[in-house]
Amino acid sequence: MVTFPDGTALLYIDRQLVHEVTSPQAFEGLRLTGRKVRRPELTFATMDHNVPTEDRFNIKDPISKAQVDALSQNCREFGITLYDLKSEHQGIVHIIGPELGLTLPGLTIVCGDSHTSTHGAFGTFALGIGTSEVEHVLAAQCLPQKKPKTFKVEFTGHLNPAVTAKDLILKLIGLIGTAGGTGYVLEYCGEAIRALSMEARMTICNMSIEAGARAGMVAPDETTFQYIASGNRPFAPKSKDFEKAVQFWKTLPTDSDAKFDREMTIDASKIAPQVTWGTSPGMVTDVTNRVPEPDKVPGYSRKDVEHALEYMGLRPGMPVTEIKVDTVFIGSCTNARIEDLRTVAKYFKGRRVASSVRAMIVPGSQQVKKQAEAEGLHEIFKAAGCEWRESGCSMCLAMNPDQLKPGERCASTSNRNFEGRQGKGGRTHLVSPEMAAGAAIEGHFVDIRTWE
Amino acid sequence: MEPFKTQRGLIATLDRANVDTDQIIPKQFLKSIARTGFGESLFFDWRYLPDGKPNPEFVLNQPRFKGASILVARNNFGCGSSREHAVWAIQQYGFQAVIAPWQENGGSRIPAFADIFKNNCSKNVVLTIELSAPEVEEIFLMTDRYAGLEATINLDEQRVTLHLPEEISFHFEIDPAIKARLIHGLDDIGLTLKHEKEIHSFESRHNSQLYK
């Protein structure tokens, strides 16, 4: 549209997704400067971070309530579509975008949320932005951007049974570090990626930011087109529009001879289920390994590892499978889609959550919840002793009442194991849904590949 | 936007790598709909004891760092969540700049700051300064050795000067567009909106694939 002499360009934004936490100051900025939302019809909002997952209409914290109310008010004032708590489409912003058909190949999408990278699974260029940039896009529908560097990550071979997209991305972060992707857009490709469902591709792209990359992408293919054509996606193209769109989407994949700034190949068939043991997503290892010695962790200083192990209450040399958990959280924009719930239901069917464990299953959206209940999955979860909740971000960042207590240890399908992330003093181990289910039933981590 | 002014200020060091924005400002403070009032909650979980009193163990609570305006930390500062509240907290606490080291990685550099955080800083006139690991190490050492060590950050000349008995200076790189914006205090959104004609013309021929 406009390119400046230093290479910065104005990038047109096709969709902005909005949630209650990072938007109020942006709307306030518009009011202070007398600016309008340029394309309200390209802006879509929902409430997810503050939402209680038990009695969802009763937000007891008055400050949370005020923030949720502010979003409703702002959407009314500026004419933006809002999927609020009463909407059948409410849910975690990165789960409802694809569900609604808002996320389509070749688009640019932004959201004031770092996990916006999720939408890259469709071959969408999707960036997490800060509140000032949210205001910028509301006002101008474009954003000054420099062309990022490119990083090709090829996963060759096939994943072993019970090894998942979550393990692929955790493994990658362990290899390149949490800043290894900073300044790059990651493109995930290779046989193992092609074989993944759309939901699994979303899981990988979702955690690109944990490798430092603002965006991660997968080239669209038949799997992508089928996903978009399936289900009730009000914003997806239909019939002739769809045929036309597919023709365009087929032009999007990267040329086979394209040059990348950095490339890496990983053999997917050699990847084991991953478990994080520290307070950074790069502090991760195979379930079959032991908690590492502080001086034997590439990319982290001895001091950082010692600090992390102290916070986590772990000793070096301890087998990962001996780590006992108090809580299991299955949810978040990383792993709370219907396929995740179907998978964990297979493990919970006819089994019980260990008596020492509290297991919580939080569907990513109202649509996911409805589908799970239509399939009877909630009955399996309840019979196993899991709590079945309403949709929202929940214990991934614990802005709502779902929080860990100090010292409480959690196997979590979410994306960040930072200190205090799930509640002050809480200890988070990031794992796949399969691994989380195994830990819930046994009370400690198990190698889900060989379990039972 | 207020322009960035050359200032002499006290240095505070935080010897931690991968400081994430959850640490900089924990989630409970993100519920505010205001843009102010975050300074007191900066590094909340490290800074305060459970009873709400300042934690004497945390470096920023040490008397020697009281009133600091330059924060020096380790690599990958500001990783994680996109929350701009982290930058507001740093600024409202009194920091006008954060210094961190890039890392060498087989001929290429791993940036010192997480992307979104760095971007957010530039929108709020908080300067992020990337130096080499030995340079940052030197600042850590000198700050320990010389109590009350101050530095001057000259954005125009892209230089950090440590006011030691014998002054030393480090050159830093910065994106020229960001530099110009910070020096002149330009309104980022206003700059984009000057291109209304081009945006409008693009919109008339671009398909945002909105099927409803």
Image (cartoon, coloured by chain):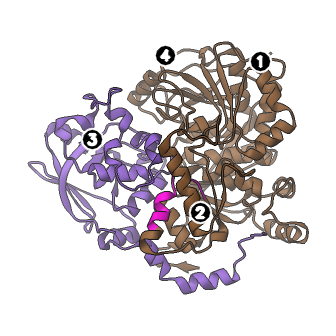
Chain colours: A brown, B purple
Task: Please report contact status of discs 4 and 2: CB closer than 8 Å, yes or no.
Answer: no
Question: Which is more toward the observer, A401 or B168?
Answer: A401
Where residue A31 appears, x then y in whole percent?
Answer: 46, 69
Frontmost of labels 2 and 3 is 2
Give the residue type that dot 2 points to: Cys
Q: What element carries label 3?
A: strand
Q: Is mark 4 on a helix, strand or loop?
A: loop
Alpha carbons under labels 2 and 3: distance apart: 42 Å
Q: Name the residue under label 2.
A: A75
Give the residue type that dot 4 points to: Arg
Q: Give the range drawn in magenta.
A: A18-29
Say which quarter of the image contains residue A151: bottom right
Instruction: Please give the label number shown on residue A315.
Output: 4
**The N terminus of chain A: image quadrant:** bottom right
Q: Mark 3 lies on which chain?
A: B
Alpha carbons under labels 4 and 2: distance apart: 50 Å
Q: Name the residue under label 3.
A: B13
Would you say residue A260 sits in the magenta stretch?
A: no
Report whether mark 1 lies on the same chain as mark 4. yes
In percent of the image, x 21 and y 64: which residue is there? B6
Q: Mark 1 points at which residue?
A: A451
Is residue A193 among the parts visible in the rendering?
Answer: no
Circle 4 Cα neighbour tier, 10 Å, few/some/many (<14 / 14–19 / ≥20) = some
Give the residue type that dot 1 points to: Trp
Q: Is mark 2 on a helix, strand or loop?
A: helix
Where residue A59 appears, x then y in whole percent?
Answer: 57, 41
